[in-house]
Structure formats: C-alpha cells, structure tokens
Image (tube, rainbow, N blue to C red):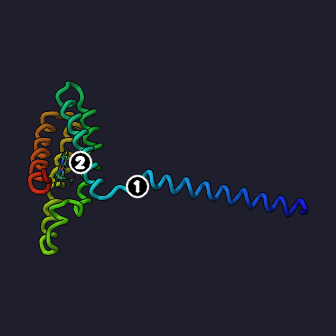
Amino acid sequence: MPVNIMRRRLGLIAFTICLTISMWSAASFAAEKPEAHGDEKLEHAMEEMQTLIRALGKSMREEGKEQQSADLIQQMIPHAIIAKSEYMHVHAIEDASPAEQPKLINDYRIKLNDAIIGLAQAENALLAGNKKQAAQYLTDVKTAQRAGHKAYKED
Ligand code: HEM
C-alpha cells in the first residue's frame, strides 16, 4: 500500500478513536451530573438560605461584624430569588387545581418577596452601620419564613 494512503488511513483511525473517547467521556459526565430537577433546586435554595441565616445569626451576635453580616445577606438573596421562581415545584401549588393555582402562585411570590425585601433592607442597614435597625428587618424575614412554611412547606 502506498505510504500516503497508509498515512491517510492511520489519520482516519486516530480521528475515530478520539471522537469515540470524547463522546464516551461526554456521556459519562452527563450521567454523573444530571440536571437538577426543579424540586431539588427549590430544596437546595432553601438549604443554602438556612446555612447562611445561621451564619448570619452568629455574626449578628458578634461585635464589629456588620460587613460580614451584610455579605452573608448578599449571598442569601440569589437563593431566595431562585426559590421564588421554582413555584411550580411547591407541592401545594403543583397539586392544586388550575383554577386555584394563580392565586397560590401570587401568594407564594408575595411571601418570598417579603423575605427578599426584609433581607435587602437589613443589608442596607448593615452597610450604613445601623445594626439595630438591621436586626429589626431580620425579624420581618423570620415572619415571612414562618408564614411561607406554614402555607407551603410539608412536614
Ligand atoms: C430566610 C428564609 C427561609 C429559610 C432560611 C428557609 C429554610 C428552609 C429549609 C431549611 C427548608 C427545608 C429544605 C429541605 O427539604 O431540606 C425549607 C423548605 C421550604 N420552604 Fe423555606 N425558608 C425560608 C423562607 C421561605 C419562604 C418565604 C417560603 C414561601 C414563600 C418558603 C417555602 C418553603 C417550601 C415550599 C419548602 C419545601 C421545599 C421542598 O419541597 O423541599 N421558605 N425552607
């Protein structure tokens, strides 16, 4: 067989091997990292908020940790926004009739917005150095959390 044909064949074989390996590794990566389902996204967002609010409670009890507390709140807000957008995975909304759903969705969004507003106001108060006011706004967040869980979280 002429050398140039042999080279071309070898090149083709090498190319096929590379393509097979890359397709195989892409498939196994996809199997290892499945897309998070909406209900997992909601659960994850809530768990992240819980971890951060615990850390926040601790930093609020310590002197001179206003900036750290504000930063923790900043990290919480995106999780609250994700939780708000995942309303279709809230069981009480998912299982409601189409006629009931719009009202429940709006109420769920209002309750999460109450939490987000309280967080943003507490963050602003901390950034301005007003810890006492921040603590007051954080009680609004707790109230929104309690109301949200009473209405939508199953035990
Ligand atoms: C700072 C505020 C909040 C914190 C720290 C928080 C924390 C949590 C935690 C730890 C869970 C359990 C997650 C798990 O299953 O492992 C949870 C679940 C849940 N929360 Fe919140 N929450 C907050 C605010 C809210 C608000 C305002 C609402 C509603 C408007 C809400 C609705 C829910 C619902 C529907 C679930 C059940 C999710 C599921 O199906 O797994 N939460 N939350």
Spatial separation of the CA atoms under disc 1 and disc 2: 20 Å
Q: Residue at x 78, y 58 (%)?
A: 10
Looking at the image, residue 34 sits to the left or right of residue 11; the answer is left
Name above or below for residue 72 compared with residue 112.
Answer: above
For the residue pair 38 and 68, the one nearer the viewer reads as: 38
Residue 111 percent coordinates (x, y): 14, 55
Looking at the image, residue 4 sits to the left or right of residue 101; the answer is right
Looking at the image, residue 14 sits to the left or right of residue 2; the answer is left
Name above or below for residue 98 compared with residue 73.
Answer: below
Q: For marks 1 and 2, give the one nearer the viewer.
A: 1
Q: Which residue is disc 2 drawn over?
A: 46
Residue 31 percent coordinates (x, y): 45, 54
Residue 34: which disc?
A: 1
Q: Which residue is drawn at 15% across and 69% down?
A: 101
Whether disc 2's CB lies below 8 Å from ligand 1 is answered: yes
Numbered disc 1: secondary structure? loop
Residue 17 falls in which quadrant of the image?
bottom right
Numbered disc 2: secondary structure? helix
The amino acid pointed to by label 1 is Pro
Residue 82, can we see it?
no
Name the image quarter holding the N terminus.
Answer: bottom right
Mark 1 and mark 2 lie on one chain; the one further toward the N terminus is 1
The amino acid pointed to by label 2 is Met
Residue 62 percent coordinates (x, y): 19, 26
Residue situated furthest top in the rendering: 63
Whether disc 1's CB lies below 8 Å from ligand 1 is answered: no
